[in-house]
Amino acid sequence: MQTMKAFVRTDATSGNVEIADVPIPAVNDDEVLVQVEAFGVGIHDRYFIPRNVDFPFPIGIEGAGKIVQLGNQVTDFAVGDRVIFTTSFQPKGGSWAEYAAANQATLIPMPDHLTFQQGAAVHVAGKTALESMRALDLNKGDSLFIAGASGAVGTFVIQLAAAKGIHVAGSASARNHDYMTSLGAEKTVDYHDADWQKQVNEWADGGVTAALAIQPGTGKDSLPVVKDGGKVITVSGDQLEGERGITVQQMSHHQDTHKDVIQLVHDIADEKIKLVIEKEYPFEQGLEALKKTETRHARGKLVVTTP
């Protein structure tokens, strides 16, 4: 049995992750085997695993690499193709490995001049940003407050909103304010400041049209900056009651967003949208990258390159 190195959860309860040698996954008829060149680092990678799986279990959701094997029903891709892929919640393991099995429906052909590191950084944050924009449903001239705007999702949302003519305000630590402004934010606030909500309300003349709460616990704090009858969209699943006619809803996932992610990849390749990778880590430092992301203080995306 051929084996590979992978970052694995060692059991169902402890959350412990370590490097181990595990079998290379077999592919089903509608899957491909990808030689992983790089994988994206996500805030939930340590914990997003299916139930009732065998351990050690390779973690991870997104990556980029070259196809080395095709299932019998795969017709639109060939061995050697460079692809972006996702592996969310599949029992045979994820992307934090030298090889990963991926369903052909998740694959995105990589434009020639994108690096594997860039490809690995797009899918999860990009899809979340696109689905957040769909839920917000804003128009030119509307205003948006983004809580936790300097991370991977916020980096995309700022640009997508500004491109539609939406006025964007965002919160982050002070060191990220120039960064957010460079992406298109018109107003930046430091969530450490006691009066940051007042600052946003003064900028938005009584409240923004909508708020996007990316980080856990930020939904409640975002309510006071939204005008009466506005909207709060939560990414992290915050449960809160609306007030003053404000609608509160959780961002939801849609299958047809895949085609929008493909377009986003091309927009990044064409430099219409900026993809920001704060740091690329070598494989052996993958746990360091995971811990950095778990602090929720990363700017843009972190990626890990495989050997």
Image (tube, rainbow, N blue to C red):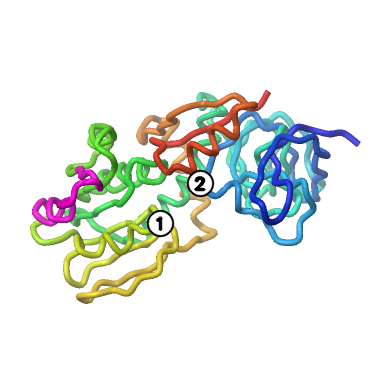
Q: Position of residue 82 (x, y in %)?
A: 63, 31
Q: Residue 179 in the image: x percent, y percent?
A: 28, 33
**Residue 172 visible in the snapshot:** yes
Q: Is residue 228 left or right of residue 87?
A: left
**What crowding class fits label 1: few (fewer than 14 Cα within 10 Å), some (14-19), or many (20 or more)?**
some
State if disc 1 and disc 2 touch (CB < 8 Å).
Answer: no
* Circle 2 residues within 10 Å: few <14, some 14–19, many ≥20: some
Classify mark 1: helix, strand or loop. loop
The magenta stretch spans which residues? 188-203
Residue 245 in the image: above or below residue 35: below
Instruction: Report the residue at 41% width, 50% height from top.
Output: 129
Task: Look at the image and say whether residue 70 sits in the magenta stretch.
Answer: no
Name which residue type carries label 1: Pro
The kind of residue tagged 2 is Ile
Q: Quadrant of the N terminus?
A: top right
First-in-chain label (2 vs 1): 2
Please state which of residues 210 and 255 is positioned toward the viewer in this rendering: 210
Q: Say which residue appears at 47% left-offset and 50% top-offset.
A: 127
Extreme residue in the front direction: 14
Q: Is residue 90 above or below residue 245?
A: above
Q: Which residue is mark 2?
A: 43
Q: Quadrant of residue 286?
A: top right
Circle 2 sits in a helix, a strand or a loop, which is it? loop
Q: Is residue 255 left or right of residue 134?
A: right
The outermost residue toward the right is 1
Q: Which residue is mark 1?
A: 216
Position of residue 90 measured from the top left corner of the image (x, y, whole percent): 70, 53
Q: Is residue 39 above or below residue 170?
A: above
What residue sits 50% from the left and 30% below the top?
Answer: 118
Task: Indicate the position of residue 240 as horizontal and vertical percent values.
Answer: 35, 71
Image quarter (top left, top right, bottom left or bottom right) of the C terminus: top right
- Figure label count: 2
